[in-house]
Image: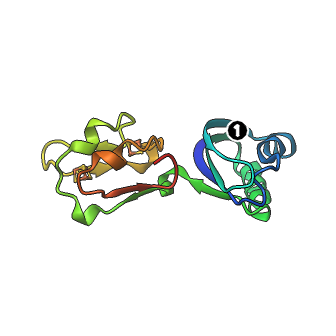
Amino acid sequence: MKEKFVLEYSEQVVNEPIIYTLVKRFDVMVNILRAEISPGREGSMLVEIESDPERLAAAEAYLAERSVRLIPIAQSLGFRQDDCINCGACTAVCFSGCLTIGAPDWTLQVDRSKCIACGLCVPACPLGLFTLRFGA
Ligand code: SF4
Ligand code: SF4
């Protein structure tokens, strides 16, 4: 299975070879899509991980031990749906198909499984209803 995650690093482990260890010790494939990490500071990374559930669970346990948070991409997108006025502005910038609007009711539909954490919806919403843990 292949899934996207946000890795959040504490400043204590930002210099450790976390990705190398995941690949070498736990035999999971890690594709780094984006990274914002500075030596001596907290950082975050958007990654795609290919593994089976057992190896992923072992890798997760290792990351937890090293104080690295592994957040499924669907959980990294915050959205205040109750305040949405269904203007559709966010759907114009969301090319992943996560945000759609259309007939018959013209209300915004959010399919978090399609989110790629690009962050474009954050500035696009006039009401500031989106937040993202990474990239915005
Ligand atoms: S972060 Fe990108 S992919 Fe995710 S909902 Fe916003 S615009 Fe769509
Ligand atoms: S841009 Fe904001 S208010 Fe407009 S449909 Fe998207 S979430 Fe709702």
Picture residue at 42% right of the left edge, 50% below the top: 112
Tell me which colouring the rendered structure shows: rainbow
- Residue carrying label 1: 30
Residue 11 on image: x %, y %: 72, 59
Type of amino acid under label 1 = Val
Residue 50 on image: x %, y %: 67, 39
Residue at the outermost left position: 104
Residue 97 on image: x %, y %: 35, 38
- The answer to which of 55 and 44 lies nearer the viewer is 44
In the displayed structure, does residue 98 sit left or right of residue 10?
left
Instruction: Tell me, yes or no, if residue 112 can be seen here.
Output: yes
In the displayed structure, does residue 9 sit left or right of residue 65?
left
Query: Where does ligand 1 appear, by image quarter?
Result: top left
Residue at the outermost right position: 25
Residue 21: name its quadrant. Answer: top right
Residue 54 on image: x %, y %: 75, 52
- The answer to which of 51 and 66 lies nearer the viewer is 66
Quarter of the rendering occupied by the N terminus: top right
Picture residue at 75% right of the left edge, 57% below the top: 63
| Mark 1 neighbour density, 10 Å: few (under 14) some (14–19) many (20 or more) | some
Picture residue at 74% right of the left edge, 54% below the top: 40
- The answer to which of 80 and 12 lies nearer the viewer is 12
SS at badge 1: strand
